[in-house]
């Protein structure tokens, strides 16, 4: 999974706890850890999303749902992904998302 650098920094600082992605097939699972420019990030949960609430957009690092929607790329269903910073020893070196 890839995060824009400003979002990755927000996760590392604790100000960003969500991400939204469009996928045909979900490539991540709860417990997965991946590397970002700001350090390792853990996937805490992944669930389908039918809409984006104002509070969720802000928790994802955006001012509003329309601003977040403009940043979404790809096709497929919308998913809400809960994120948290991970420690370096939680990384799975053989896996790439």
Image (tube, helix red, strand yellow):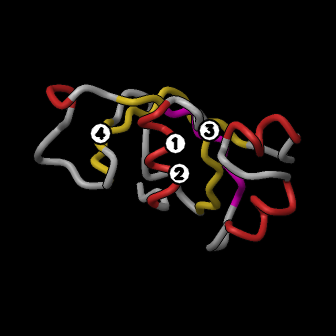
Where is mark 1, residue-wise?
Answer: 10
Secondary structure of the residue carrying tag 4 is strand
Magenta range: 77-83
Which of pointers 1 and 4 indicates the residue nearer the eye?
1
Instruction: Give the left or right position of residue 49, taking residue 4 as reference.
Output: right
Q: Identify which residue is drawn at 47% across, 57% down.
A: 3
- Residue linked to disc 2: 7
Q: Position of residue 72 (x, y in %)?
A: 68, 66
Residue at the spot 77% in from the left edge and 38% down from the top edge: 56
- First of labels 3, 2 by sequence position: 2
Pointer 1 local density, CA inside 10 Å: few below 14, some 14–19, many at least 20: many
Q: Is residue 27 above or below residue 12?
A: below
Q: Is residue 81 magenta?
A: yes
Q: Is residue 12 magenta?
A: no
The residue tagged 3 is: 18
Alpha carbon of mark 1 to alpha carbon of mark 2: how far?
5 Å
Question: Disc number at residue 32?
Answer: none
Marks 2,4: beta carbons within 8 A: no
N-term mark: 3 or 4:
3
Please, what secondary structure does the residue beneath circle 3 have?
strand
Asked which secondary structure carries label 1, the reply is helix
Answer left or right for 38 relative to 20.
Answer: left
Mark 1–mark 3 Cα distance, whole angstroms, equals 10 Å
Q: Residues within 10 Å of mark 2 (few under 14, many from 20)?
A: many
For the residues marked 3 and 4, what is the alpha-carbon distance in whole angstroms?
Answer: 15 Å
């Amino acid at each position: 999974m890839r995060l824009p650098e400003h979002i990755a920094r927000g996760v590392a600082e604790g100000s960003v706890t969500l991400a939204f992605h469009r996928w045909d097939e979900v490539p991540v699972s709860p417990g997965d850890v991946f590397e970002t420019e700001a350090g390792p990030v853990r996937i805490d949960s992944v669930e389908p999303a039918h809409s984006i609430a104002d509070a969720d957009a802000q928790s994802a690092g955006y001012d509003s749902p329309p601003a977040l929607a403009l940043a979404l790329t790809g096709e497929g269903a919308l998913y809400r992904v809960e994120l948290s910073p991970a420690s370096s020893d939680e990384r799975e070196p053989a896996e790439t998302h």
